Amino acid sequence: MAFDHLPEALQQLANKSLLRARSVVADDYDAVIKVDDRHYINFSSNDYLGHRQHQDILQSYVEGLSRYGAGSGASPLVTGHTTCHQALEDHLAEALQREAVLLFSSGFAANQAVCQALLQSGDTLVSDKLMHASMVDAAMHSPANFLRFKHNDLTHAEAQLQRASGNVLCVSEGVFSMDGDCADAAGLAALCQQHDAWLMLDDAHAFGVLGDNGLGSVEAYGLNQQQCPIVMGTFGKAIGTGGAFIAGSQVLIDYLLNHAKHYIYSTAISAAQAKATLTSLQLMQAGGARSQLQANIAYFKQLAQAQDLPLLPSDSPIQPYMLHNPEQALAASAGLKAMGLWVNAIRSPTVPKGQDRLRITINATHQTKDIESLVDGLVMMRAKLA
């Protein structure tokens, strides 16, 4: 029988404590979610600034919906590109000091599009070992050579750049999605200039968080368009809406517009979403939520360090609690949920084998008592699992 291996494959995942399943969220407001008629303080959301529920952003959605409708109705090159989309692209280009911007439906699509459009046989993609799966998958299906360097290891990165041939694209996350640490973006930029390579930063988890105005790694490290020719950012995390963008030179954006299949053949994000995203960006740049986020991160780290909790070093909203095997990670997550704390277990292959963890995320809407409850819960969970 065709595909009769599927049940066995699922059972094998279950036997290894690696089977994935969804939870249905009934309500979600102010860092509290409702699942199966129970309420939990949510420490697993990427909504770092709490913008998904901001009334000004919701009002922008309403205004966009009333003028343009629920969807865009077409791809951007047909009739799906509106004044709202153009305003968002123009705002981003000016803020990031790039010549142009192109919007995408997701960060996954944007990363795939860059690889598919730019890299040919004989070219080389050089990537941090912990680069997001969207880029790794794109590289594996690209005709270009694929070289990886040890995580945040500039010496190994330089060795791989020396091996590279053809047009060379070097990619790294700005803030790594599972470890929460930052790339040495300035160091990578310098190496790329020495080796005639382009640097691309996936700023999905840095955009809205890093920099004086929340504009991500290129602002935090002062990287201009020549130093970092390609910036990818997403709106579904700190910005609180959805979609993504690529920022760079006008030539790059024009080339992608003509060659990136993930852009050409995808329905555009809605005008309402673009309008709401622009409002969110303006609020983000104002800084109030970012200041609260940084205060909450600092408070959590202070309490966690006082309890000697096994966290990876991170100053970002992503605070990984290491447990090193999937069974312990699942047990820890279940124990915290029993206390009303929603913290997801992250297991292989999302992270390397033996690096299973709780991925704790802090956001600007968490209250002091929420953070104190989390640390108390982690301490109790540790004692129970010891």
Image (tube, rainbow, N blue to C red):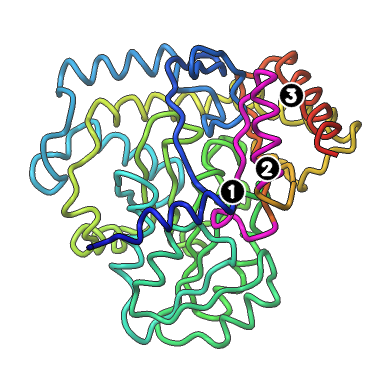
Label 2 residue SS: helix
What's the amino acid at mark 3? Leu
Q: Position of residue 197 (x, y in %)?
A: 49, 75
- Disc 3 packing (10 Å; few <14; some 14–19; many ≥20): many
Q: Nearer the viewer, residue 122 or 343?
A: 343
- Disc 2 packing (10 Å; few <14; some 14–19; many ≥20): many
Q: Is residue 125 left or right of residue 44?
A: left
Q: Name the residue under label 2.
A: 329
Q: Is residue 282 left or right of residue 63?
A: right
Q: Where is residue 260 in the image (x, y as percent from the top left)?
A: 24, 61
Is 303 a magenta residue? no
The total of numbered circles placed on residues is 3
Q: Decide which of tag 1 and tag 3 comes sooner along the chain.
A: 1
Q: Position of residue 287 (x, y in %)?
A: 58, 25
User: What's drawn in magenta, residue-wise?
Assistant: 327-354
Q: Is residue 153 left or right of residue 118?
A: right
Q: Name the residue under label 1.
A: 17
State the CA–CA distance, disc 3 to disc 2: 16 Å
Label 1 residue SS: loop
Q: Position of residue 177 (x, y in %)?
A: 57, 48
Image point 71% across, 44% down: which residue? 328
Q: Decide which of tag 3 and tag 2 comes sooner along the chain.
A: 2
Q: Mark 3 points at which residue?
A: 374
